[in-house]
Image: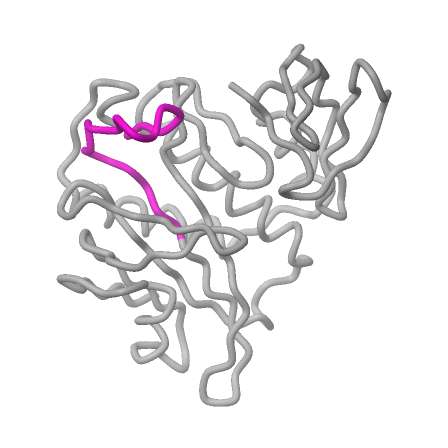
Amino acid sequence: MSQLFHLENCFSTNDAILSLISEDEPTAVFTFNQTKGRGQYGNIWNVTPDQNMAYSLAVKTSDINIQDTFLNYYTAIIVCDFLANLTNADAKIKWPNDIILNGKKVCGILIEKKKNNNKDLYIIGIGINVLQTDFSNLPKAGSILSATGLRFDLKEFTHQFHQYVISRIRNINSEDEILKIYNNSLFRKDEISVFQKNKVRQNGIIKNADKNGFLWIDLDNEGLQKFFHKEIELLY
């Protein structure tokens, strides 16, 4: 069993969930009007009211039998698989955990560790653009609707998504299998791409992500190197 709460609005589902957590089962919360959502590394995740979904799931750390890096990878795999199955569109993971649907970023993920009532928790925050069509100031962004032409009822979409997430969280793959699936799903893997490092652009090829969270890229001018998030930018 799991609990799923709907909030008409909130600052951040990752914060709001702390007051709703059940002692005995995974708890999730969602809203279609998140006003101060957070992304990775201090980024802001804004949603247009009643067009997109912000969702957070709280699970005890003791219930997760994989390392933090692999939980990050696995969560991205879950969302990528859900969207691919739902839309039959090309869904990929842009390292470390953005979801790209038909070439547009439609989802961001933020996983935090928090303590609540003396219990250690993972708070898995997921924002998905569902119905938004105006991305005039965000040329890389899109929604399920803008990327595929498919329109979904937000509440039905969220309940279906929640059930899928819960089923996958309860049956976690091994770390070796997660790493294999993650690399098979990487956006622009083994393709010549343009990267920006220290304000300098050069071509390179994404080779793989590793178990420590690094991305390995074979750069034209510097050869094979590993990078952590924000150390290099993929231009697409």
Q: Is residue 99 left or right of residue 156?
A: right
Rendered view: 90 above or below 119: above
Residue 138 included in the magenta stretch of the image: yes
Is the residue 45 above or below the residue 226 in the image? Answer: below
In the orientation shown, which residue stands out farthest toward the top? 192
Residue lying at 27% horizontally and 44% vertically, measured from the top left: 160
Q: Position of residue 74 (x, y in %)?
A: 57, 45
In the rendered image of this protein, does residue 118 appear above or below residue 114?
A: below
Q: Position of residue 171 (x, y in %)?
A: 53, 52
Foreground residue, 123 or 232?
Answer: 232
User: Residue 222 falls in which quadrant of the image?
Assistant: top right
Quarter-of-image position of residue 3: bottom left
Quarter of the rendering occupied by the N terminus: bottom left
Q: Residue at x 45, y 34 (%)?
A: 99
Residue at the extreme front of the image, as rendered: 199
Answer whether residue 81 is magenta in the image: no
Across and down, in percent, residue 143 comes to 28, 30
Instruction: Name the spot of residue 36 as percent of width and height, x first.
Output: 30, 59
Task: Identify which residue is drawn at 42% across, 67% down.
Answer: 58
Residue found at x 28% / y 37%:
129
- Total numbered labels: 0
Colour option used: one colour
Relative height, residue 55 to residue 209 (above, below):
below
Q: Report whether 13 appears left or right of 197.
A: left
Q: Residue furthest bottom?
A: 118
Report the span colored magenta.
Answer: 126-143
Characterize the magenta stretch by its predominant secondary structure: loop
